[in-house]
Amino acid sequence: MIEEAHSNGARYSKACQLIGISLRTLERWKGIGLKDRRKGAQKRVVRKLDHEQRKEILMTCNSVPYRDNNPYEIVSELLTEGRYLASVSTMYRVLREADQVHHRSTTNVKRHHSKPPERVARGSNEVWCWDITWMPRSVKGLFYYAYVIHDIYDRSIVGWAIHETESVDYSKALFAETLLKHQAEGTAIHADNGHPMRGLTLMALFQLLSIKVSHNRPRTSNDNPYIESWFKTMKYQGSYPHSFATIEDAKTWMAAFVDWYNHEHLHSALDYVTPAQVRHCEAEAIFQQRNATMAKAKEAFPERWGTRQVKVWKAPQTVVLNPDKKE
């Protein structure tokens, strides 16, 4: 119609205006044809399988020789026979759309376990983590079990107990005593995934006290790194025995070690003050003394530093358990 009007003397711009399209649209139609290239327009995908091809794939996969094989095996065998129906991913897509992709192995279905929530501690008694570790007995193959609660902010051991077995009753008793001792309210507690950490009586206690609880993913010790690191410090300590004759020996050694760790151990993550000094707010005065001494040293011997800044001694203001890397 536009060409007819133009041949009769009309201008293209006027003819397009009358039809309701722009002159640029007319030029584009002349250049690349009338194919609809708008977003969302129906298009013919050259690589898309037609109905007969999809039907052939389903029939082949369900046939006797191949019905117990997965698409990787089916494609390989078909290629060996000199046949090609589709790629592995296409075959999976066709089977999935036909609701024919299901778990058929005798093994359990793999489950996705989400990462534990991020816990941020800006002071003592805000986030605790805990776990149970073995302490070898003098009889090979037998162990005592050390229950240990660790404050991730000041790195102190706030509670511990040693028993001959793992039991949720022992866990509940330890937490009831420790929470009362430290007057902890609103504390978040992170633990491993074992039964003593998930027992109903322990969970009931936490719910009663409005405590937020989180657990490791199965077989993922990195979700609880602070307590795992403490266990390494404990067992690689020079005074750690290779075995304990009695449970009293284990308790005596643990009491001495926890006292040393809390009150004498200069912790590297705390900029070399003890956990007790951070917990009892004594660290700030120590850091001020160190910083003042460093400032005087630089003033007396500036050539030793040159343009470098003097180290500032301070403890971390926040400690994060299982940080969200997306943020």
Image (spheres, helix red, strand yellow):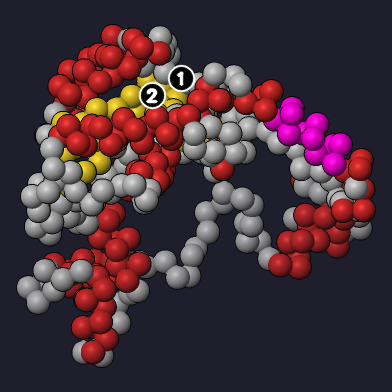
Q: Position of residue 67 (x, y in %)?
A: 12, 69
The residue singled out by tag 1 in the image is 125
Q: Dominant secondary structure of the magenta stretch? A: helix
Q: Residue at x 48, y 29 (%)?
A: 263
Question: Is residue 9 at least partly visible in the picture?
Answer: yes
Is 3 placed left or right of 95 in the picture?
right
Vertical order, 288 against 27 (above or below): above
Earlier-in-chain disc, 2 versus 1: 1
- The count of marks equals 2
Assess whether mark 1 and mark 2 are in contact (beta carbons under 8 angstroms).
yes
Q: Residue at x 71, y 67 (%)?
A: 32
Q: Position of residue 276 (x, y in %)?
A: 50, 25
Q: Residues within 10 Å of mark 1 (few under 14, many from 20)?
A: many
Q: Which residues are magenta?
A: 287-297
Q: Which mark is residue 158?
A: 2
Vertical order, 59 against 181 (above or below): below
| Residue type highlighted by circle 2 | Val
Question: Is residue 220 at least partly visible in the picture?
Answer: no
